[in-house]
Image: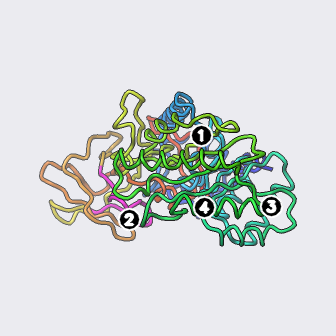
Amino acid sequence: MGTEALVHLADERVDHRFKGLPPDAEGLTVGELAAQRRNLFTGGFTTPVLALSAERLEHNLTLMETYAARHGLAFAPHGKTSMAPQLFHRQIEHGAWGITLAMPHQVRVAREFGIQRVFLANELLDPAALRWVADQLAADADFRFICYVDSVRGVELMDAALTGTARPVDVVVELAAGEGARTGVRTEAECAAVADAVAATTTLRLVGVAGYEGEVPQPDPDRVRAWLRRLVALAVDLDMAGRFAGCDEIVVSAGGSAWFDAVADVFTEIPELSATVLKLLRSGAYVSHDDGHYRRITPFTRIPEEGVLEPAFRLWAQVVSRPSPEQAFVNAGKRDAAYDLDLPFAQVVRRDGEERPATGVSVTALSDQHAWLRTTPEADVEVGDWIGLGLSHPCTSFDKWQLIPVAEADGTVVDYIRTFF
């Protein structure tokens, strides 16, 4: 089903659902429109329109593939960033072990498009969703599914929902990143109690430990590494207590997009355990990267010898009003651009086929459908110009667009990425 569903994405008809696409493409299939290789700037696309750089997307996929391989890490990038099955498969083609997800709906999307390994970075308690997962496991011997457990009560609820199922659901104990952090078990003693609760069931199988170092309070390299060493020690202690008996591999997983260098370093310290260790990194924002939050926090700024991620998004909007020399407005706002971490960044101005830096132009606010621009005297901006905006936070950029053109450097659109939020 998965490969077939992926192929059929190209059969979807272009219509009013998809922002920014050429009006005269109405009725074409996505595949037919892609085959026309229209130009983003001259091919009838309307503003606002979000585009992904074909070259930068490929660069980022390759960089993280080589980084993970160089450091002996398996890689399950977080799919909630893009919720784009085409990108899931490209990530797997670039060496990913599987895909990390957060919610049952996201797992259903992944399975519809043939993803065979899913790490659910959450505790799954909904009985209907658990039974659906159990049915998937029963129907497909090659499907691997792992999720968190973080309480004895949670284990009890999962066990009750899964009674009578054919295959046990693999789980990892989630270690909290500290007091006041998000989810997870707060102490090692409580982790042992959760592990014992899992062992008392026939519906669940404990296969490892996991957590998210991005939630470490007041994070710095020392605090993050100290917590990661707690996670490794927890895996060692549970293994010595025989709680992974019968496992072919023991999962130790961490890794957001801010501290994966620390994960790589500390995971080299994992000693030999009773089974092979799957060192599973879960960073997801790398696929598109960004021009704001992740550009500032990416570990590649600390380890430049490892490479550089490149921001792949650009949102194109048109200047629709220039009411004063100090102000202009473009036709993209909160409905189109991520704004939860930073406002968009004015990068380039395009006029009559020529592109130049957006000198003296900055975004000061967003309305629902407009961005407010401040313009200084050196700004050369006219009504009708296209403004290329950089964005901050991929996770809230992808979710505003159902079909995203992938454009080469000269503007040739070579593909379209379908998202499922």
The colour scheme of the drawn protein is: rainbow
Sequence order check, earlier mark of 1 and 2: 1
The answer for how far apart the CA atoms under marks 2 and 4 are is 32 Å
Q: Which residues are magenta?
A: 329-346
Q: Earlier in the sequence, mark 4 or mark 1?
A: 4
| Crowd tier of the residue under label 1, counting other residues whose Cα lies within 10 Å: few below 14, some 14–19, many 20 or above | many
Mark 3: few/some/many CA within 10 Å (<14, 14-19, 20+): many
Front residue of 305/105: it is 305
Residue under pointer 4: 122
**Residue at x 75% of width, y 66% of height:** 130
Q: Nearer the viewer, residue 23 or 123?
A: 123
Identify the residue position indicated by label 3 in the image. 134
3 or 4: tag closer to the N-terminus: 4
Secondary structure of the residue carrying tag 4 is strand
Q: In the image, residue 95 lies at what x, y percent?
A: 62, 34
Q: Which image quarter holds the C terminus? A: bottom right
- For the residues labelled 3 and 4, say whether their Cβ atoms are less than 8 Å apart: no
Q: Amino acid at mark 4?
A: Asn
Q: Is residue 219 left or right of residue 39?
A: left
- Which residue type does callout 1 highlight? Lys
Q: For mark 1, what is the residue? A: 279
Q: Position of residue 191 (x, y in %)?
A: 59, 59
